[in-house]
Image: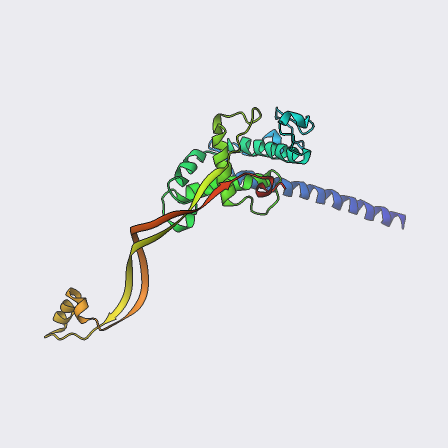
Amino acid sequence: MTIITMSVKRKIGMIEETMGKLVKILESVLVENITEQITMDDGSEMFTDNDLSGSGLNDGVTGPKLSDDYSKFGDPDVTPNHVNKELVLDRHLRKIFKQMKKISGLEEYMEYVSKQSEEFYYYNSPDREKHSSVRGIVQRIPKILGAAGQQGVDRNTATTLIYTFLNNGGYGRDFSKDTLDLSPLVTYDIDAHTSRDAVLHETSWGEVFANSKEEAIQKFEESPDQWVSDSEHQDQESGDYINIENTSVTNTNKRHLTLDNLGFA
């Protein structure tokens, strides 16, 4: 009985050891998959910064810490809890921006959306996929840094991150130093009465008086308005805008970066 018990324990130990090795292999594969999704122009992996392994919000960042005296922030009406939230947001943004420095194409993205809508679904452009991919990478950074949410931040927040990153010095900035400018990204909702060309595709019928089939076809093609007696709508294509009037601003939007929309609330 003792021999059987020892044998079973030995087998259980071997199984546990094997399972431990499998878990480590799976963890390694998952890390590789994440880093392969987001790589830089020079081929280096993106999320290898020490910030990812540090657990403290003050790691690698100079300036005010969470334990500092609140009076140095000036406003006596600001509560300690409010100051704490601002400092926590500051630390998260610095970590996000340090990772964004490794992504090329952010300036081009902001130039692109300053000329046409950031809603990439509604128009064709040769650079559409490229800029959509750049924004998609930025959307996932907070999630990889520990934020909540399955898909990362939304499109508007990602664009605001890019705007704020560039507004604070962008690629040439040392984000472990100095104060961050968190001015909002301002946009305007527009309402207007618009007119545009449209192409209507139909199947049309008509009875033509002619001396031959060839002549009937020719008459119909040259003057369809004279011969079409009925038609059936098939499809419609919208063309260029030909008139815009009664244009007005219906709302001014100020996009702020917050712990909530970044997923750290």
Quadrant of the rendering where the C terminus is positioned: top right
The percent position of residue 121, horizontal first and vertical second, equals: 42, 50
Q: From where the camera sits, is residue 137 visible?
A: no
Q: From where the camera sits, is residue 51 visible?
A: yes
Q: Toward which corner of the image does residue 18 lie, by quadrant?
A: top right
In percent of the image, x 86 and y 49: which residue is there?
5
Q: As rendered, which of 237 and 186 lies closer to the eye?
A: 186
Q: Toward which corner of the image does residue 82 lie, by quadrant?
A: top right
Colour mapping: rainbow
Left or right of 53, for residue 230? left
Q: Toward which corner of the image does residue 69 lie, by quadrant?
A: top right
Residue at the right extreme of this rendering: 1
116 up-or-down from 97: above or below: below
Q: As rendered, which of 191 and 226 lies closer to the eye?
A: 191
The percent position of residue 7, horizontal first and vertical second, equals: 83, 47
In percent of the image, x 50 and y 31: which residue is there?
101
Q: As rendered, which of 252 and 164 lies closer to the eye?
A: 252
Residue at the left extreme of this rendering: 211
In percent of the image, x 82 and y 49: which residue is there?
8
Left or right of 223, for residue 139? right
Q: As rendered, which of 225 and 217 lies closer to the eye?
A: 225
Total number of numbered labels? 0
Residue at the front extreme of this rendering: 77
7 up-or-down from 164: above or below: below
The percent position of residue 120, horizontal first and vertical second, equals: 42, 47
The percent position of residue 35, horizontal first and vertical second, equals: 55, 38
